[in-house]
Structures are given as C-alpha cells and as structure tokens.
Amino acid sequence: MYKIHSEQACREEEQGLPISDPTVKLLRQHVHSTAGRVKGSNQSRTSLRGQLWSTPVYLRPWNLWITIDPVDIHDPIAQIFAGEDIDLDKFMAVLGPDGEKRAQNIAADPYAAAKFFHFTIRTILEVLFGIEVTPFQVQSSMGILCEVAAYFGFVEAQNRASLHLHLLVGLKHAPNPDQMVELLKQEPFRTRIAAYIQANLRAHLPGLETAQSVKSIPVEKDIAYNPPPPPPPHPTAPDYDRQLKAFELRLAGTEQVHSCQVRRCLIVSKSGGLRCKRRAPFTCHEKDFIEGGNWGQRRVYEFMNGWIPGILVNVRCNNDAKLLTNGRDTMNTTFYVAGYAAKPQQMNYNISGGNSSTEEWRWRLRGWQKFSPTTVLVGM
C-alpha cells in the first residue's frame, strides 16, 4: 500500500500536480521543515526569498544597491591572516612581501582570504554604516549613508574565487513610495537628493574627463597595500581636503575604470555581436540630478564606474552603488537578488549545501542570527 501511495505521489510531483495523499503530504511537510535548516536547500532559499520580499513590505522599499569587492591580494590585513609578520603600527610597504608573494599567500590559503573578507565586511558595516553587532542584538546609528533600517545581501565568488558582496539597503526616515512621488515634485527636495548623490554616489572627479586624462593617472595595482587607515591625507593636515581629493583620484583611476573584455563582461547579444553586461559605455551627465523617478551622477568619462567615496578611500577597493528611486528599478533589483541568490533548484531531492567558496549570513535587527556556510544579510 505504501508503495502505491509513493508511486502516485512521484507521478503527481513529476507532472507538477498537488500531492493528493494526506499521509504523503504530511511527510513532505516534515521533510520541508527539516530541510529548511539545511543551507542551500530549496526550503532555506524559500525562507530567504520570504525575508527579501517581506522586509520592504514591513518597512518601505529598498533605497540603495551596493557592491563591495575587497582587494584580498594587496591588503596587508589579508597578509596577516595568511601568516605574514607585519607590524601595522610601523608599516613600511617596501619591507613586506612583494606583489607576487602576496598573491601566492592568498592562493595558498583560501581560509585566510575568506577570513579577511568577513573581517572587512563586518568592519565596513560597523564603522562606515553604523551597524553594531552583538551576540544578542544589532543596533543601528548614523553612518556615512544615513541610518540603516534594513539590509539584505549575498556573497558571490568571482572566477578566481575571490569574494565580493552585493547589498540592498533600506534607510531610516526615507519617504514611502507615495511620499516620494509628491516630494520629487518639489525643487528643495530634489536639491537635497542631488547633494546626497554628489556626496555619496560619485562618478567624477577633476582629472577623469577623457580617456587621455584617465590614462595619465598611474595605475597602482598595489595601492591597497598601505596601513589602515590609509596614508596621507591625515585629518590634521592643513591641506586635508586637497590631499583627500588627490588620493581619491588615484584610487578611482586604479579601481573604478571599466574596461570591456571577453570572459569578463562581454557577452553575445541576440544579434550575434558582443555587448557589455555592465552596460558600458555608461551614460554621461553634466551634473548630479534627480527628475521624477530617475536619477543620474555627474559622469564625464563614459567608462567610469560610480563609487562610494567613504568605501573607496578607507577600504581602497572597487565598489559601486545605485540609488533606487522608482518602482521599476527596485522591483528589478529585488527580482535579481531573489532569482540569483535564492533561486530554487530544479528537483526537490537535489539538496546542496551551497558553494564552498561562499559564506551566507542572515541578519535581523533586534537580535540577528548568523548562519553558515552561504550568505544573506537582512536587517530590520
């Protein structure tokens, strides 16, 4: 009798039909409840998708889409995790391991690279975003982007297995969709948003106007190999602002210039040609603006990626951020995260523990919990 019931349930599942037998349905519920605690299973991914969609319903839509790509090869902290004897209080770049040795250290110790990534992201969340994590709760205070109300993110491994983070962020006190529509009709509010873009979502500095001016900036691949905090400018310097702009320009010229290459960003289009999946060359604008539900950064050179100055200067790595000001962008980004990081697998029995090169976190404000081995960040 059990065999008959199980065979019928198998046929119904293969045909995409609801399971009719109550005993099999009850068994399946128990299996799903158990599998929901297994990272990488369809049930755990369903839970993550539920958190992803319910968070903006409970609060309000996401406001920012951020990507952070720490430089594990050239950061001295990563080298310390890999076993190098480096004194950051008396740091001298010329005395440490050279670039080739640093790359060998990271390639030989993936755990050190993952540990560095985890440490860096936690530090960014705490120091730059104002999120303090304790074993029992998470507190949010004012950060460089304003006070964070919620976030959801996932870690992705690149072709060379280095890790980078994609992050959706919701800000406290941000207008809800109805309020946003009305506020965007008011010039003072649009001016405030443009000032926020200029301060936090930059895509231009003097010296990044043309391909020739960008090429004149030396590409310093090991610019991240400096003590934290970075070398000059120091806040007490009399010409601090000038030094800060000069250092940011060096970093932007090294980390933020996009170059289209096969197997990196060029993919075959429907017409059979090659197109950049990053949509380069990017649209240029003469000033930072927001009109209706659309916004733009000041960008003069069409191959400059945008960046968050606070992350670029302090972490010295490639990063990007986009402001989500209309329903279509927010919906597309949310669908991308749901379909990319939390997509279900094809077969119910094909349960995987997740990619061994990624780490998955799930966070909830007012008592976050940490899970492994795959990552999603949700703060509420």
Image (tube, rainbow, N blue to C red):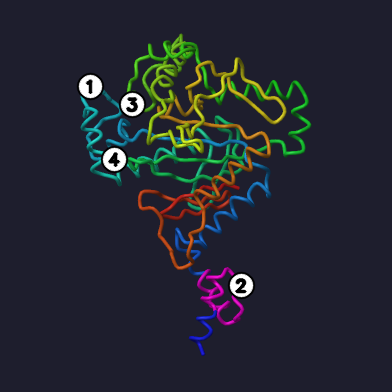
- Residue drawn at 31 percent across, 36 percent down: 78
Q: Report x, y in % for residue 370.
A: 47, 53
- Residue drawn at 39 percent across, 34 percent down: 264
> In this rendering, which labeled residue sits more in front, label 4 or label 2?
2
Q: Secondary structure at mark 3?
A: loop
> Vertical placement of 111 versus 202: above or below?
below
Q: Looking at the magenta stretch, what is its main secondary structure?
A: helix
Which of the numbered marks, if any, corresponds to residue 307?
none
The residue to which callout 4 is attached is 81
Q: Secondary structure at mark 4?
A: helix
Going from N to C along the chain, the mark reached first, 1 or 4, is: 4
Going from N to C along the chain, the mark reached first, 1 or 3, is: 1
> Residue type at mark 1?
Val
The residue to which callout 1 is attached is 94
- How far apart are the alpha carbons under marks 4 and 2? 51 Å
The residue to which callout 2 is attached is 18
Going from N to C along the chain, the mark reached first, 1 or 2, is: 2
- How far apart are the alpha carbons under marks 4 and 3? 15 Å
Q: Which residues are magenta?
A: 9-32
Q: Report x, y in % for residue 74.
A: 31, 30
Q: Nearest the camera: 371 or 166?
A: 166
- How far apart are the alpha carbons under marks 1 and 3? 12 Å
Indicate the quadrant where residue 13 lies: bottom right
Going from N to C along the chain, the mark reached first, 3 or 2, is: 2
> In this rendering, which labeled residue sits more in front, label 1 or label 2?
2
Which of the numbered marks, if any, corresponds to residue 227?
3
> Residue type at mark 4?
Phe
Verify whether residue 100 appears in magenta.
Answer: no
Q: Are marks 1 and 4 in contact (CB under 8 Å)?
A: no
